[in-house]
Amino acid sequence: MNRLVSVLAIVSGLGLLACSDPDAAEPWRPSDVIFISLDTLRADHLRVYGYDRPISPHIDALAADAALFERAYTQASHTLIAHASVLTGLYPERHGADHQEGALAPGVVTLAEVLAGAGYQTGGFVNALWLTPRFNMERGFQTFDYEGTLDQQKRSAEETNRAIFEWVDRLGDAPYFLFAHYYDVHSDWERLPYDAPAEYLDRIAGPEPPGFEAGDGELWATRHLMRRIARRELFDEDDLRYVERLYDAGIAYTDAQVGRLLEGLRERGRLDRAIIVLTSDHGEEFQEHGRLIHTQVYEETVRVPLLVSMPEMRGSGSHGCRDHPEGFRASRIPQLVQHVDLLPTLTECLGVEGPDGLQGTSLLAALAGGDVSPAAAYFVSPAGFALGRQRGVVRGGWKLVELDEGGPRRLFHLAEDPEEQRDLSGLHPEKVAALARELDRHRGEHGEKRTASEKVELSGEERAALRALGYFTELEGGVARSPGGSDGSR
């Protein structure tokens, strides 16, 4: 059941942003901000990132009028941890929500709080338990509409849009910040490992292969996938391709609803002055490294789509950023960027003072065609999954994956081996050592400044439901372990 939570902005009384820019020929009105998060969407399943199936026409159309970041990374392969970094501009080691029972720490300021304090009308519409007030993710949203009960997978993107439009229709003239989170690409459905309306299943997925096992009728689909891993029962090639087509059907449906959201906002006159950000929290695995779901830190889970569309890129008469009256052009940006860069980018663009201690870097220079300073990206997997916490770092063309904290390490050269199939750690021990030192420095530096997390006490019923969804791994007879040492190639 949808619940509507009204939350007072923590920062208040600061008034609207100044609505005039002394350096511009005409007054500048603060831009609206539309932030779209598509849970579990991997970049390489979009046509604009090289996918060969035309399943994302609306996102592709948005990309034509946007800056597309070719090398964007999440901070974590988990919904809560990744979104906490998106909304705070902090690494998981700092914001507190860095494990499956840790809520956003007290005192950590969110993007919604910053914008609410600057006079924005803020609305969040989310569809996962991890993003609910249980984990303090409602901070700064004056309207927070969430579907995060134990049957969290029930609200469709279409229903989410309906709730968004009801909110938009009540908005006044002040600028607004919309955070729209869609869960339909995620595997948490009962019927199949991935699900979508029948027309998308028929058109995109096609018929089931002979003998295909979708589950036993009792397991939620994600747990079915986790159980297969625990029992080392990976899919054969035909079944795996079908599972991917099911995933693609979910993408096609969600893409259509993204198009409906943007069209509905346009019809209401609420799109022209908006900055649109579209990304995902993490990707998904299809046995590229011996597993399913999103429990590791290989490219299929941590490289994410990232589009930033300014009003002027879409032919609007306004420009998106306060101090850039010349505006920006649609482009493809090859520099390495991270989710923690988004909050400082938006605050600088809007002329709003951000919170102290941000760990990301503004991307406005990259949007203007220049260089951007971040030289590395850091990411983790959540503790509590079958194989412990993985860590990783990308610097230049190199990537180091640490399979458990202090455990085995694998080295890849992404330009030559983008699918990470050739471990070069034995050939380049000096590179492994250098990147391992960087990972240790990163963890130590940010761990020292860590804000203590609030522990979320989950009920037995909630833990059982989350275990069924694959988030805890006490699976009948022991903890699941990855087949083939976590790195088997399909």
Image (tube, rainbow, N blue to C red):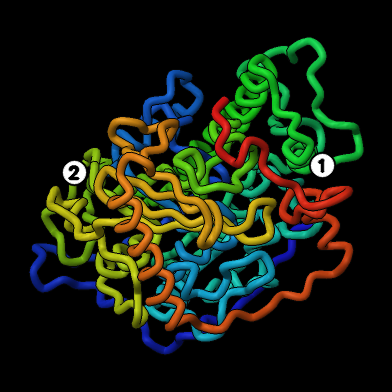
Residue 220: numbered disc: 1
Distance from the alpha carbon under mark 2 to that under mark 1: 45 Å
- Which quadrant of the figure contains the N terminus? bottom right
Lateral position of residue 471 relative to residue 392, left or right: right
Q: Are marks 2 and 1 in contact (CB under 8 Å)?
A: no
Residue flagged by tag 1: what amino acid is it? Trp
Residue 329: numbered disc: 2
Residue at point 33%, 61% (across, down): 341
Seen in the picture, residue 226 relative to 402 is either above or below; the reply is above
Residue at point 72%, 37% (across, down): 229
Question: Closer to the camera: disc 2 or disc 1?
Answer: 1
Lateral position of residue 253 relative to residue 266, left or right: right
How dense is the environment of label 1, judged by Cα within 10 Å: few (below 14), some, or many (20 and up)? Answer: many
Q: Is residue 233 visible?
A: yes
Measured from the top left, where is residue 476 in percent x and y? 88, 48
In depth, the one of 264 and 457 nearer the eye is: 457
- Which quadrant of the figure contains the C terminus? top right
In depth, the one of 370 and 483 nearer the eye is: 483
Lateral position of residue 268 relative to residue 347, left or right: right
Residue flagged by tag 2: what amino acid is it? Arg
Lateral position of residue 282 relative to residue 129, left or right: left
Residue at point 83%, 62% (across, down): 462
The secondary element bearing badge 2 is classed as: loop
Measured from the top left, where is residue 44 in percent x and y? 44, 32
Residue at point 42%, 89% (across, down): 13
The secondary element bearing badge 1 is classed as: loop
Measured from the top left, where is residue 197 in percent x and y? 70, 28
Measured from the top left, where is residue 317 in percent x and y? 22, 49
